[in-house]
Image (cartoon, helix red, strand yellow):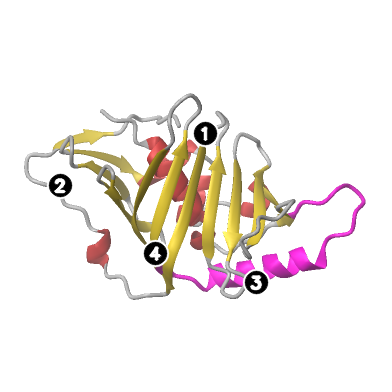
Amino acid sequence: MKIIWKAIFPAIVLLMLFAAPVRLETMVPAGAPVSKDLKRVLDHLQKHYHDTNSFTAKFNEEIATVGAPKRQRKGTVSFRKPGRMRWEFETPEKQTIVSDGETLYSYDPDLNQVVETPLKQALKSSSATSFLLGIGNINRDFKAAFASPPTPTGLIDLILDAKTGGYKIEVGLDPKTYDLMKLTLTDQLGDVTKIDFIGIHDNVELPDSIFAFKAPPGADIVTAPASPTI
């Protein structure tokens, strides 16, 4: 059985920004004044993602695992609150990850295998993933700061640092729309996942059928372990 948690985890962490109002704590040195610009950015970000109920986009993903060659994938993603998502990885290896709000399905066509996990069980693997269901508290779990130095992309670059340690999230926001354009996740092992988004469409009509999953004929159905380890 393939280990799917490395693929699923970055996707769910990304969606935390869409799953609940964003309330971030600004991260500044002790005694220093809070940046008014940072507060303004976070206020805009909170409003944008509070008002975003669904989206679709294309994406490019790069995974750099310590001691292994980089891997690149691309595909499409659709998301709708609460907790519904569909990731279609097109190249070089096809994979489909679907959540209907209750169960998380990962389908590998090469193996003709489906791994099914209750969504709440999958969310136990990290405090960050709880945002998919709107049960997390980003103010409790993260601090926010501008990236320094900023990248020369014209985006608003923020760092979200987990207060409990173990992983770091860097995001690049469109300065006009506040759409999430870039995401970099660094985990406790030093593995880095980068995702770029293209052609984002917010608040589109997405029917339940997009998030329904039916196992292909003859597929091997596997129930995920009770306590998955990332």
Counting from the top left corner in percent of width and height, residue 220 is at: 14, 35
Q: CA distance from mark 4 to mark 2?
A: 24 Å
- Residue drawn 66% across the image and 45% down it: 161
Q: Are marks 1 and 4 in contact (CB under 8 Å)?
A: no
Which residue is disc 4 drawn over?
Answer: 57
Image quarter of residue 153: bottom right
Q: Secondary structure at mark 3?
A: helix
Asked whether the viewer can see residue 99, the reply is: no
Q: What residue type is disc 3 on?
A: His
Instruction: Give the magenta range.
Output: 26-55
Which residue is disc 1 drawn over?
Answer: 191
Q: CA distance from mark 1 to mark 2?
A: 31 Å
Q: Are marks 4 and 2 in contact (CB under 8 Å)?
A: no
Counting from the top left corner in percent of width and height, residue 79 is at: 38, 62
Q: Are marks 3 and 1 in contact (CB under 8 Å)?
A: no
Q: How many residues crowd mark 4 within 10 Å: few (<14), some (14–19), many (20+)?
A: some
Q: CA distance from mark 1 to mark 4?
A: 24 Å
Which residue is disc 2 drawn over?
Answer: 215
Q: Secondary structure at mark 2?
A: loop
69 and 187: which is toward the camera: 69
Asked whether the viewer can see residue 152, the reply is: yes
Q: Quadrant of the image for the C terminus?
A: top left
| Position of 110 relative to 48 (above/below) | above
What is the number of the mark on residue 44?
3
Q: What residue type is disc 1 on?
A: Asp
Q: CA distance from mark 3 to mark 2?
A: 41 Å
92 and 24: which is toward the camera: 92
Q: Quadrant of the image for the N terminus?
A: top left
Q: Earlier in the sequence, mark 1 or mark 2?
A: 1
Residue 164 vs residue 117: left or right? Answer: right
Q: What residue type is disc 2 on?
A: Ala
Magenta span includes 54 = yes
